[in-house]
Amino acid sequence: MKKTLLFLLVCVFFSSCEWFKPKPEIGVVLATHFKNKLYKEFDTAVYKIIFLNKLKDLKSRLSNPKVTAAHYAVNEYKPELIIKFYSNGGLDSLKRYIERSKADGFDPKAFGLKELSNLLAQLDSNQFKTIDEVYPLIATLELKAADALLRYHSVMKYGSVNPRKYFNRYFIKQLRPDSVHMDSILSTSDLLLVLNNSQQTTKAYIDLKMALAHYRDSLKTDDNPLIRTIKLNMERLRWQIPITADEVVRVNIPDFSLTWFSKEDTLVHMNVCVGAKREQTYAEKMRIFLQSGKLDDKPRNHETPQLYSVFNAIQVNPIWNIPVSIAQSEIYHQALKDPYYLSNNNIKVYYKEKLVKDPDTIRWGRYAREKLPFKFKQGSGEGNALGKFKFIFDNSSSIYLHDTNNKNGFKLKNRAISHGCVRIEDPLKFAQLMVKDKYQYDNLRMEVNLPPIDTTRNAKYKRLMAKKTDTLKRFQLNPAWFATRKNIAVIIGYATAWVENGRVQFRPDVYDYDGLLWEAMKPYR
């Protein structure tokens, strides 16, 4: 009995002296690294209070305050990054990667490089007299390292700007880091792997990165319009588009061109016409229009949106469903001036979904164009504004690629002339690549009065042509639909600089997007 009582007393004594309490991991790590017993006095309860106060002070300056706070709450406010990556040089690697971000067009200061370097230097000096001096440094270094890591990974991997917040006609759904992903970055056990995986690896990006270095060496300054343009387009390449298709049709608005890629191979390249630039005084006119509600005050904006989709159909000899905006701004005035304009241009008028048999008799002056009760459709044929081909893909802006009955536009240097859709220079070639097989392509050719490639089908072609020219039966030309090959993506994008055959290609900023993007990138440049 006496022995048992003595044993219990000894246990209580040792327990009260905390002899059996495990030492905090941060204390063990630092004590071992510096061979300094001071760090073994590390008290997690005291540190937690200081950390929470520091988190409160820095919250407004953190890039992801909610993610950061939630992560450390779950992990009992331990200085995990210091525990895992201080002694093995991981935090020094983070600092070096941030220093090298200049090669990607960034200012390393934007990632907190100066503060991170100073804090690491203070800890490296190992000049603490009491453990109380250690707590605020560890708390600040942990939070600054976490913020630097999250900023660096997010900006390098996904871009410093979310374009959907700055461009109202940007409809490309991007990959962006969510809270779960950001938490996984803070929880990593391999910091070098995270830093390496943050880098851009596409050839297009690496080429521009090398071009940036070359121009810097040549010009001896960053204050140059060409260098600025290269930086802007590196940023655009950081915006990640989740493309799963092997074949991608890329339309570049500033280049007025279309390129069809099959993996790394180019299948076709051709000129295009894109939407006209918005009016110079667009913002001011829009403000006036929103107050007045008058169409005469409404500014023009036909800029082609940036979007991503997948082709699903070809309409041959298409019908043009004329948008309300064009009906109000153009068709109405033409019909008012010339009562035969509609019939001469094969434009049918519908009232309450019913065809108006004789639209030339409509007294247009009786109707306010703001409240036109009519819909307009231009029938198939030579005069149709969409030409003979319309290439369709799902999107919220009613945009498509199409032929045109006005080929002169392709001779212009500035081909921003359409109402928003993309006119393509060689629609027949485009259709040939789009359809499933030669048989389907021959059917398509015959629909537009071209003989089949397969001469064994010439008899059918002659019968079809005879039917079309039989005026007594009044042949009515109607649209024909063709399915496309599966999984051909289309990206309508905006690039004002890229590398081609070892040389940087620069293009005019046709929609003035570069200035807007440059301002949005300000915190990181």
Image: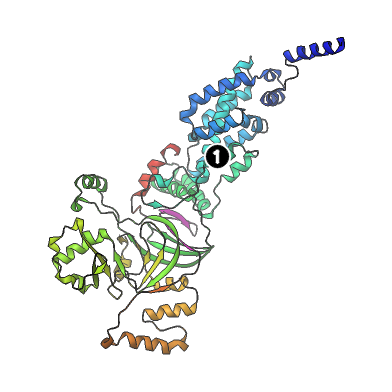
User: Which quadrant, please, contains the C terminus?
Assistant: top left
281 shown above or below 391: above
Which residue is rendered at x = 18% and y = 53% of the image? 296
Badge 1: residue crowd in 10 Å (few <14, some 14–19, many ≥20): some
- The count of marks equals 1
Instruction: Give x and y (percent) for residue 348.
Output: 24, 70
**For residue 514, side relative to residue 85 (left or right):** left
User: Which quadrant, please, contains the N terminus?
Assistant: top right
335 shown above or below 45: below
Looking at the rendering, the stretch of residues picked out in magenta corresponds to 488-507
- The residue where tag 1 is placed is 182
- For badge 1, the amino acid type reads Met
Q: Residue furthest bottom?
A: 459
Colour scheme in the image?
rainbow
Which residue is rendered at x = 47% and y = 85% of the image? 454
Instruction: Give x and y (percent) for residue 3.
Output: 87, 12
* Quadrant hosting residue 138: top right
Pick whichever, 467 or 173, lies toward us: 467
Pick whichever, 134 or 460, lies toward us: 460
Pick whichever, 420 or 48, lies toward us: 48
Q: Residue furthest front?
A: 1
- Residue 501 highlighted magenta (yes or no): yes
Pick whichever, 249 or 20, lies toward us: 20
- Residue 40 highlighted magenta (yes or no): no
Which residue is rendered at x = 40% and y = 84% of the image? 451
Which residue is rendered at x = 54% and y = 23% of the image? 52
Query: Tag 1's secondary structure?
Result: helix
Question: In the rendered image, is residue 45 in sight?
Answer: yes
Instruction: Give x and y (percent) for residue 400.
Output: 37, 63
410 shown above or below 27: below
Question: In the rendered image, is residue 134 in sight?
Answer: no
Give the main secondary structure, helix, strand or loop, of the magenta stretch: strand
